Image (cartoon, helix red, strand yellow):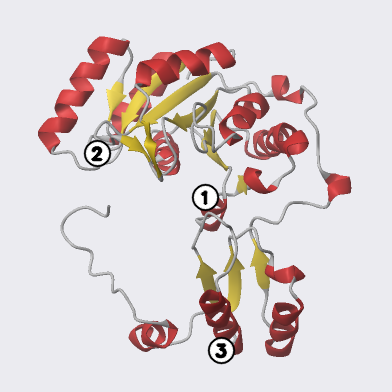
Amino acid sequence: MLGEPPKGIPVCRDLADALTRAGATPDYFIFGMAPASGRLSSRDRGMLLEAIDLRMNVVNGLHEFLTDDPEFVAASAARNVKIVDVRKPPARESLRTFSGRIAEVTCPRIVVLGTDCSVGKRTTATVLTRALNDRGINAVMIGTGQTGLIQGARYGVALDAVPSQFCAGELEGTIMEAFEAEKPDVIVVEGQGALSHPAYPTSALILRGACPDGVVLQHAPARAHRADFAHMPMPEPADEIHLIQTFSDTKVIGLTINHENMTDADVSAAIAGYQDELGIPVTDPLTRPPRILVDMVLSAFGGL
């Protein structure tokens, strides 16, 4: 996943081992696990309480909110540390419904969708946003999941924790905030799941809330079946593109490749094959120059 050469990142036995290797106690403990249940195991619960006892602030990405748990509230107060529940949505009375104000956003809005979950949408959105900014095009990324927010997206909302009635409105409102504050040339929105995947409906709500001018589709050609769903074959990009463009008034402007279990020659063959089949630009964001991603956007939005 991290490429070559090896990065020398240690795998630690437990929190004590990690702190020994670090040589000091960090200010923050980020709990980056995302089990399907969204809840803490008893072992994880003990580790988080241990981190608090060591006076580390805790960043929690689960659906189980530690700020609602009396034991964690008492422990954090005793040690004078903060708990940040990244997925915790705003209070019900302040949640926004879709208003149509998204039409006031005059710059292109590009959503990075995928043919599966855990296929690289967030990574591609991050690489694309950075590449646009490096080219002198002011781009802002909107995070839509807990990991993007933990990684530092300035604007975003964990949509899978928001009641479905308010998802489109919350995303619309977040995009409006970024547009008004940053005056961007391009807004890039991180996708979730896949529109065709029955387990992850958030893609539909992202398309509704963002009303994108263009979509970049991420695909893993060597993946035989959906992640965690061995009985579900992966869709073909052409089928996902048709579904996206039928469901939403938008256009898929390019395809990006996840090169898991592929050689460089496999990636080159996939790029050439999909370009011939689909008639759109295709690249691998991690093994091919970022300028190709930028050119993908520029060819779709000449005004930039």
Q: Amino acid at mark 3?
A: Leu
Q: Earlier in the sequence, mark 3 or mark 1?
A: 3
Residue highlighted by disc 2:
259
Q: Nearer the viewer, residue 26 or 34?
A: 34
Q: Which residue is mark 3?
A: 54
What residue would you read off at disc 1?
Answer: 148
Amino acid carrying label 1: it is Gly
Return the residue nearer the eye: 280 or 203: 203
Mark 2 lies on a secondary structure that is loop
Q: Position of residue 293 (x, y in %)?
A: 34, 29
Name the residue rendered at 74%, 73% in the picture: 69
- Would residue 55 be found to the left or right of residue 193 on screen? right
Per the model, the C-alpha gap separating discs 1 and 2 is 21 Å
- Badge 1, how many Cα within 10 Å: few under 14, some, many 20+? many
Q: Residue furthest front?
A: 231
Residue 302 higher or lower than 25, as above or below: above
Above or below, 243 relative to 163: above
* Circle 3 residues within 10 Å: few <14, some 14–19, many ≥20: some
Q: For residue 17, what is the image quadrant?
A: bottom left
Between the C-alphas of marks 2 and 3, the distance is: 40 Å
| Farthest-out residue, left | 265
Q: Position of residue 25 (x, y in %)?
A: 48, 86
Residue 272 image position (x, y, % from top left): 19, 19
- Residue 106 in the image: x percent, y percent? 64, 20
* Residue 303 visible in image: no
Q: Which mark is residue 69?
A: none
Q: Secondary structure at mark 3?
A: loop
Q: CA distance from mark 3 to mark 1?
A: 26 Å
The mark that comes first in sequence, 2 or 3, is: 3
